[in-house]
Every structure is written in structure tokens, then in C-alpha cells.
Image: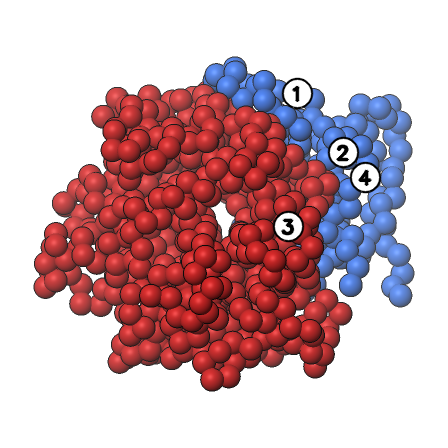
Amino acid sequence: MRRREFLELPTKSMGGVLLYTLAQAQQTVRVPLRFFTTAEARVVAAACERIFPSDESGPGATEAGVVIYIDRQLAGPYGRDKYRYTKGPWVDSSPEHGYQGKATPKEIYREGIRLLGDLPALPEAEQDARLRAIEKTAFFQMLRRHTLEGMFCDPLHGGNAGMIGWQLIGYPGPRMSYREEIDQNPGEAWRRKPVSLADMVGHLVAGQEEEKD
Amino acid sequence: MQRLKPVDVVIAGGGWVGLAMAKEIAGRTPLSVVVLERGPARRLKDYAAGMDEVDYVLRYRMMQNLAEETATHRHSAGQSAVPIRQYGSFNPGTGVGGAGEHWQGLAYRFLPDQFRLATVLREKHGRAKLPAELAVEDWAVTYEELEPFYWRAEQMMGVGGKAGNLRGQIVDGGNPFEGPRSHEYPNPPHKQTYLVNLFTKAARELGYHPFPSPAATLSQTYRNPDGITRSGCAYCGYCVRYGCMIGAKAQPTNTLLPLLVKRKNFTLRTGCSVRRVVHRDGRAQSVTYVDEVGAEVEQPARVVILASWTLNNSRLLMLSRIGDPYDPSTGKGTLGRNLTHQVGAATPIFLDRPLNGFMGAGGLGITLADFDGDFGLDPSFGILRGGHIRIASGGEAPISSFGRIPPGETEATWGSAWKKAALKWWDRSASITSEAEHLAYRQNYIDLDPNYTDKFGDPLARLTLDWTDHERRQAVMAEKVQETLAKAMGARAGKPARRVGTHYSVVEYQSSHVSGGATAGTSPETSVVNPWMQHWRMPNLWVIGASAFPQNSSGNPTMTILAMAYRAADALVDRYLKHPGALA
């Protein structure tokens, strides 16, 4: 068994709820990692932050805890391709046949992270340049997609901490009914403080990433 | 292999067709009926806890596990195929209820002339003017023959809509191009949203005939003729790719299963993958399957019904060596021919005002048939058949809907400038979509792959399928209409999300309406099953589903599949059981 790796995050940067309740406390939380090493998590977190930055338009990947989402996905069945057809022969094909490679998402990340080097140490402009250089790779496409997922997923998956991503766009979360609202407010935004799936059903819900073999 | 006690009827597949057949047979006769479903049981309470985009939309939690079984694809017969390794152009379901659990609930009927398409095209264009490779055929049934069965399926589900043709009388507000209906829909249409109202107004101004998309997501509380009561849709938006948490969307588990579980002559076995139909001297003897603990089991039966997903119906026949595989070079053989999909087109649109697009239902929307079938074809495109144009408030999910940006705003796809633009346009974009008829061609077919196998080591189905210039022109014409509608709505049209490119792609979602392979017809020379879905060579084997379509029509196929199943069930119960043998 490998040594437990943790990612230390300042609480003030982690999610809306923590942000509101612990704004004064300059503490850190130690989040146990399931797949990444601490160093890898830092590289991925830096890359996600450039993809979906925290800026004048609102919070970004760091506040949403996107790297935690990605870590859990990669450690779960998705990361090891439990739901992808992985029998050979492996042959290259046309773009119309999609990704035909042997590497699992885990392996794609491990290799991709190596290409990024010590990303967190670079100034933002150089981080962007390094990411632009790999924009066309399967790794970057996956990283970009996963960043969005970690921004706007249900918090049960470890991203969208404090539903900060949903607050950012005005998504109200899963709700039982819009029977009264569906044909009202034409052209006017209907916005509510978001609820999570756990809030709605009244118990914690485990995502597929928790599935054991 | 464990050999079980014989039963009267064994059904492979527990989706719409399998459970509808089981309900008709087990409900109307004392015969013992066993349904074998490869996937798990489904429960309503799982669906409330399943309102999660990551697992259900992005990770396809309700679909077949492709690691265990998929299909392979190639563009033409000379190439070797590669497996469809991850989900893309279509989504086969698994589990009790099958794809009928996570469907959109769009409940169209096909147009009358789609059932006699070969004749229609010949009469209009002359045989010589049609492409030589065209393999279009008349169906084994007519619209008029299917009408009572469509009505039975609509009542069972409680479809909501507005008739446009009541017994020949054209009714304002419905689809004036549809075939005559014997009855108004069982329920009124859904409430409509700001988005679909804008579309409706624009379409009317352009002189088109928009009508509410017929929806199997209930518009109000409804009790069906079987005595099943379900509540009206709550527009929660967790609809397509999800099971309905309140049972408002008609699903096999909330319309058919509750009746079946009360029947002592009905047995459902989950986790059971059927691998072969065992046959001797022109009669099906049994099916063999692997059960949930991995044991091999043989279930003898007097009647065998294949009701699995389209491709699997054909594949099971091929693996069981029933029928002659189709050979495109000679045109001989019937099994696997006439593989079709659908011709999709979609234009993103951008509006000035927010849409609250997260509210909605799969069936909530507006359709026009002004360019469907033979109607409204623009001669400059030189196409033989058109398709539906529609818009839906289907319930936008936050991850999938984020990042739509109109042309000219920013070229970036990540970073600050992109984020700012994406935030500005989130909840102000939608899509006008279209599904056109896919004609059958000699070169598109299904056979068994020589290189790739499923988890049991059985060969996968191999799809040989590509677009022709006809489908590309169909898509371009649909996009032109979509752009016109977008402008009339006061919206900005984005670059069409071209689904019909130079070649068929398994990457982008198209629709899950794959069809053909075990077609129904009036002659054993050109089809696999007869007009009652009975195998031509094996009267106690019935093969039912979209596998029987000789070519695909423009609408969603579920109602037509169910209508054909009900017609088959009547023939089986009322005629075959009294005099077992080939029906004529």
C-alpha cells in the first residue's frame, strides 16, 4: 500500500460554504488523495486554475476543489476504464472512431502531468503557454472536460465545493418540481440558492467513483 | 449446463417490447412466461437518488457496459472494423425497462407514406432516377393496420399532444401532415416554456405548422386502461438518460411491470445474458444464457421471443445460425441487411434573455413536419425525403450546457476570456434539432466481427455503415431551415453541430434509433420475419423491435415498435396459440 498523500488547501479558498463560515480563520485542510501524489495534485490544480481561473468574473477551479473531483474520478472505475471496451487488437483508426488508445484515464494523466513539469512554479503567462503547447492532446482535452465537470458537478463527487460553481452560474441544483414555475417568468431569470442531491433526498448519495470491484 | 423445466414462452430482453409481450401473453392466457434480462432490476427510489449529471449523463450509468459488450464499426466492406470503445452515436440501455427507462419520451407516429416508401419513391421519381444502391422497401404493414395498435400504446403510456388529423378532419394546432387518428390524444399537451413559445411564434410567422411534440411524460395525473395511475410531470429536468423519480415518464417499470408482478405465470430473471437460441428441424427448442452468478443455463420453451435491443436481435440470430447472413456483394441473404440510423442536424441558437433551461421534460417541445417525409422538399437540395424540425425544453444540465458561445465572441476554449463569455451566455442558448429519414442502402449492413468478442468470447456485431451524399444534403437542408427559424426567433444562430459529416462518426451522439438487420417483409426472399414478426423459417420464434424496420423514418421509433409488438402479440395469442404454425 502506498504512503497516504494529502493536498493542503487554505480553507478560505475552498468553496462557498467554507468561504462564508470560516472566512476569518486562516486555516488549512488536509484532503487525503486517492490517486495523485501531492506533487501531481499541485500540477493538476494549477492547470485547472488556468483553464477555469478565479478572476474578476468570479471563483474558479481552486475554490470549487476541481482537483479533488478529478482525483476521485481517476481513483474510481472511470479512471481504470471499467466501462470502456478494452479488448484488442489495438489499431489506429480514423477520427470518426474516437479514442482507440490503450491508455486508461489514469495513465493519460500520469503521462500528461509529466509533460507539464513544475507548472505551479511558473508565472501565469508561462503556465498558459505550456498548456497551449499541449492543447491538442488527449490529455488536455480530458483535463479541460474534467475541469468543467469538477466546477459544476453535484458536490457528492468532491468538486463544486459549497456549490460555488452552481452559485456562479445560477443553477439551482436538483429539485423535485418546477410545476408552478415552468411556464412563468418568461425571459426572466429564476434563481434560487442551490440545493445538492443530498439536501434534496435527505441522505448522502455515493457516486460511481465509490464503487468497489 | 443446467437444464431447466420447460416453460411456455421465454422472452430475451426486459425492455418495452419484452415486457409488453409478456404482459399481453401472461395477462390474457395461463401460459408460463419467463423474461430474461441481462441488466439489473430498477427501483423508483434509485431514480430520485440518481439526479446526478456526472454518473447518469456523462458516465452513462443506465446504459450497457461497453467493457462487456459493444459493436464494431467500419465505413465500407473492404475495411476492417474497430470497436466502439466508448459511448458516442447511440446509447443502448440495460436493466429492466431497457432504454425505455432513460428515453426522452417523444411519442411520434410515423407518417403513412413511410410504410410504403419503395412504392412512393418509384411512383414519384421512376425507378431509373433512384440511386442504384438504394435498398428501400415497403413495410410489411400499413399505417392503417397499425393505427389501432398505436392507439393502444398511446393509452397505455398516456401520451399528451394535440391531434392534427382526426379521422381525416384537419384540426388546427396539431400536425396537419400526420396520418388520420381514430382518437384525440389521451392527454393534453405539456405546459409550454418561454423558449418553445418563441419558436412557435416564429414558425407560425414563417407559415409553418408547429404542433406540441407528443409526449410520454404525463401532462397531468392519468389512469390508463389497465388501471395504472401515474402523476403528472414535475418538469424537474432530470429526464433524458435518467429514470423518472415520480413515474410521470412512461417506462416499462411503471406501466407494464406492476401488472406483471401480480401474475403467477410470470417470472423475471435479471442478470441473465441470452447467448443462443437452440433449434432443431426448424423449431426453436430453448435459449441458453449465463445467469447472474455466471452459471450456464438452458431454458426450454414452446415459444421463443427475441426482444433485445435492435443490434442484439440480429446478433443473436447470427450467433444461433438461424437464417442466411446478408452478402452485400451478391445481395443474397436476408439477415443483417438494411442497417439504418437517422440523419441528425442541430443548430445552436443564442437569445437575448435567460431561459431557465434547467426546467423541462424530455417530451416538452414543439415540432414541425412541414419538411418531413415528402413535404416541403427544396428541389435545389435534390433529396428524396426530409425530416422533423423541433425544439425542446428538455432540462439543461449544468456541465453539458456550459461553454456554448456564439460565433465572433472569442476563439478561446479555456481561460479568462472564454470563462467570461461562457458565463454571459449560459442559460441563453438552446438548440434547434432535426431528425431525417435514413434510407436503406445495399452497402449498409450488420454481420459478426471476425476480430472482436464480448465478455463471453462471442463475436461482436459489426456495423458496416456510412453516409452518402444524400444524407449530407438532407442535413444541409435541415440546417438551412433551422437557421431561418433562429432568425425569425430573434436569435443568433451558431455554427451547426454537424452530425452528418464526410463519414459516419461513432463519436458524436446521433440518436439511439438504430434499426434494421432482421427486417419484416412480405417475402422470405427479402426479409427475416413475416408481417407478424414471426421468423419465416421458424414459426415458434418471434423477433420484435426496430430490427424489423426496413429503413428508418424521421420520428422517434418507440411508438411504432410498440404498435408492431402489440400487433404481434394479438396474432400470437389469438391465432398462433390456437394453431401453432406459420401465420399467413
Residue depicted at x 49% and y 58%? B573
Q: In the depicted view, which residue is nearer to us: B161 or A19?
A: B161
Q: What residue type is labelled 3?
A: Leu
- Mark 3 touches mark 1? (CB < 8 Å): no
- In the displayed orientation, state which residue is furthest to the bottom: B281
Q: Quadrant of the C terminus of chain A?
A: bottom right
- Mark 1 touches mark 2? (CB < 8 Å): no
Tell me the number on the disc at residue A204: 4
- Residues at marks 1 and 2 on the same chain: yes
**Chain B colour as displayed:** red
Q: Which amino acid does label 1 sit on?
A: Arg
How many numbered discs sit on the rendered protein?
Answer: 4
Q: Nearer the viewer, mark 3 or mark 4?
A: 3
Residue B441 can be seen, yes or no: no
Instruction: Work out how far the residue at label 1 is from the one at label 2, CA to CA, in angstroms.
Output: 18 Å
Up/down of B77 relative to A108, above or below: below
Instruction: Work out how far the residue at label 2 is from the one at label 4, CA to CA, in angstroms.
Output: 8 Å
Residue with the mark numbered 3: B260
Instruction: Work out how far the residue at label 3 is from the one at label 4, CA to CA, in angstroms.
Output: 33 Å
The chain assigned the colour blue in the figure is: A
Tell me the number on the disc at residue A192: 1
